[in-house]
Image (cartoon, rainbow, N blue to C red):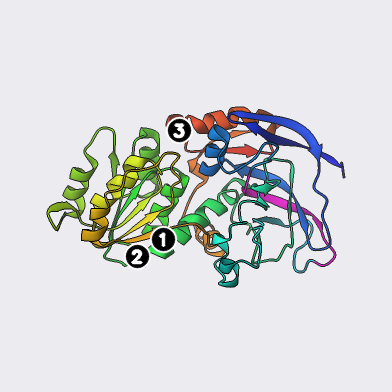
Amino acid sequence: MNSRMKAAVYYGPRDIRVETVEMPVIGKNDILLKVSACGICGSDVHSYGTGLYIQKGQIMGHEFSGEVVQVGSNVKDIKVGERGTGFYSGVCGTCFWCKSKQYTLCPNLFKASTGYGLPGAFAEYVKISNAIKGMNYFSVPDEVDDITAATIEPVSVAVYTVDQCKPKQEDQVVVLGAGLIGNAVMQVMKSVPVHQVVVTEVLPLRLEYAKKAGADVVINALEEDVLERVKDIVGVGPYHFNEGAMADIVVDAAGAPSAVEQSFEIVRSGGVIAFVGLPEKKAAIDTTKIVHKAPKIIGCLGGDIKKAIQLLKERKVQTKNLVTHTFPIEHAKEAFETQMNAKDAVKVMIDYRKI
């Protein structure tokens, strides 16, 4: 096997270069995958556009599928030739949160994980350190193609978000933002099922895809008064000194300050607000709404990959048609610029089968 590979290397905001670099070298407890496809995550966009979360020299990419090509001598139950995905989390194991088994809260998480600190999958090959099947590596079933498999990680985030909300069959849900995760949240909610899911978005293309994927109602947030429209759909939610809407659950998958602020009006008193989107700018929050409406507020950082794979296998969640653009690794910069231009793209991927 060649000892060098092509990779997209980050140098600074909107500066990513495809270079030939050394391939990862695996140890006795590691595996190496030949990457089939890797999606550009919203956090990757923030990193590419502003420099958030990463340092110069980073190879990003944590939403991927691939084929196992090397297996360390100590690794069990993983074979060369099988298709899989995974994510190595570089938690310290000694901090308060690790000892409490709250690993996603470890301060070290984004310093030594796949695509954050460690080389990611915007490269021809990616290593998963200390590979354990069912923990940080997962086999991909035959029913899930390579492109769909590269959406397993974001779907797992959507699954985790929905699980944290504890939806019930009678719940009325509003999802703010219809990128891949927002769309997946909507589909997972529908699989529960809940009473109805309303999706708001500023981009017509994403609204169109959300409607096709099963949203009960879609709202163009640039053309309509979102709060008034949601009131019409889910009912008016009076609270002390004011009135909002009556949504049982609001999921902010947009990350825009306006969506964050809006969520506190849309949720009913005693409802749930889940934040999964990552804003680049701070939102102004009126804490009196928290006091008077007493919503349960959840930050969603985590995933359930096993359940995501099962939902994709059973086609209860479908993501392949949300992949609007694919590029070869040589055109990585064009891929990132396309994802930045959100009005024309939902999900952009590097497809290593393209030449």
Residue at left offset 77%, top offset 69%: 76
What is the distance, in whole Å, between disc 1 and disc 2 at their CAs? 7 Å
Q: Nearer the viewer, residue 210 or 264?
A: 264
Q: What kind of residue is marked 3?
A: Ala
Quick check: is 159 in the magenta stretch? no
Q: Nearer the viewer, residue 215 or 173?
A: 173
Q: Could you tell me which quadrant the C terminus lies in? A: top right
Image position of 207 (left or right of 31): left
Mark 2: few, some, or many residues within 10 Å (few <14, many ≥20)? some
Mark 1 or mark 2: whose residue is earlier in sequence = 1
Image position of 121 (left or right of 234): right
Image position of 238 (left or right of 137): left
Mark 1 or mark 3: whose residue is earlier in sequence = 1
* Image coordinates for residue 41, horizontal then vertical, percent: 54, 43
Extent of the magenta region? 61-74
Q: Which residue is mark 2?
A: 167
Mark 3 or mark 2: whose residue is earlier in sequence = 2
Q: What kind of residue is marked 2?
A: Pro
Q: Which residue is mark 3?
A: 342
Q: Which residue is mark 1?
A: 162
Q: Nearer the viewer, residue 320 or 337?
A: 337
